[in-house]
Image (cartoon, grey):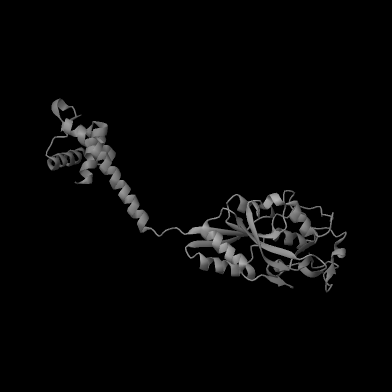
Amino acid sequence: MDLDRVRAFAAAAEWMNFTAAAEELGLAQPSLSARIRALETDLGVELFSRRRRQVELTAAGRTFLPHARALLDLAAEARRDVLRAARPASPRRLLVTTLASSVDEVKAGTLLGLRGELPDWQVTLTGVPFRDHVSRVRDGTAEAAYLWSPYAPEATRDLRVEPVGVFRRVLAVPAGHRLVRRAEVTVDDLVGEPQVPLPDDVDAVFVAAWRLVPDAPVAVAEPAVDVAGLLRAVADGVGCCPVPSLLARTAHTPGVGFVPLRGAPPATLALAWRADAHPQVERALSEAARRPRRTRAG
């Protein structure tokens, strides 16, 4: 059955006016009438009564109308399904967030492992601000995150947090700072040194662990929203900041020097994901977290 003829009939039945139906379909009225007559010939019945210049559906026309609509709906559905099948399937996404957008050897190894475990997933690493590096996982915006523990218990509730590496800390200082030429510094050397401010809504337990010194003086300046902003503030002479050695090796910023910190507790890098993660993602992330963990001196 010719769908163009069926479509012409359905439009005319809706409008009960051949001229309006022809305009809707972009046809000349004689073409519309010819299609309807051809359909009537195919079916062997009259679908419209054309007496006294009025258009009315016959009993056969009223019976055929719901079938015509169903045929057109099925044809549209078939077209959608065929086009959808012809397009390559969009890969599922696995977004991993990190405070430092630069890729180090730990993250690179994890990404390679995840892509090997999940060949049909699009695995991406992206940097996020300090205030978002836990919340993006909790709200489902990201599937996983690299976190520098510790955090307040409520921040990581409902998350699996697995340590993947332990790293020494170094002190980021301006290139002209009095401590930059030291072979190493101690935590005691931080006492009285202004540190770069972070936003007020960053996890307080995380901030205290980064500062190392209780009640550390904080410089009067615009808070650094992310790691790049933190290091720019150091370069501008706003203050200093203890950071993990892994970050120092990859987040290079002109005007910033890194001095080893002796006696400071190590920084623990962890991989975190939601406890209700997709089963494939759960297995792949668990495998990534179980890979040999290394303690880094540099």
Q: Position of residue 284 (x, y in %)?
A: 55, 63
Of residues 295 and 146, the one nearer the viewer is 295
Q: Position of residue 82 (x, y in %)?
A: 33, 54
Answer with left or right where residue 200 lies relative to residue 181.
Answer: left
Which residue is at 78% across, 56% downward? 208
Answer with left or right where residue 182 lies relative to residue 277.
Answer: right
Of residues 56 and 134, the one nearer the viewer is 134
| Displayed quadrant of residue 124 | bottom right
The residue at the far top in this view is 52
Which residue is at 78% across, 63% downward? 242
Q: Position of residue 277 (x, y in %)?
A: 55, 55
Note whether 34 is above or below 50 in the view shown.
below
| Displayed quadrant of residue 12 | top left
Which residue is at 76% across, 55% downward? 207
Give the quadrant of the C terminus.
bottom right
| Displayed quadrant of residue 128 | bottom right
Of residues 176 and 270, the one nearer the viewer is 270
Q: Position of residue 239 (x, y in %)?
A: 80, 60
Answer with left or right where residue 242 lies relative to residue 57.
Answer: right
User: From this viewpoint, is residue 58 visible?
Assistant: no
User: From this viewpoint, is residue 266 visible?
Assistant: yes
Which residue is at 22% across, 45% downward? 4
* Numbered label tally: 0
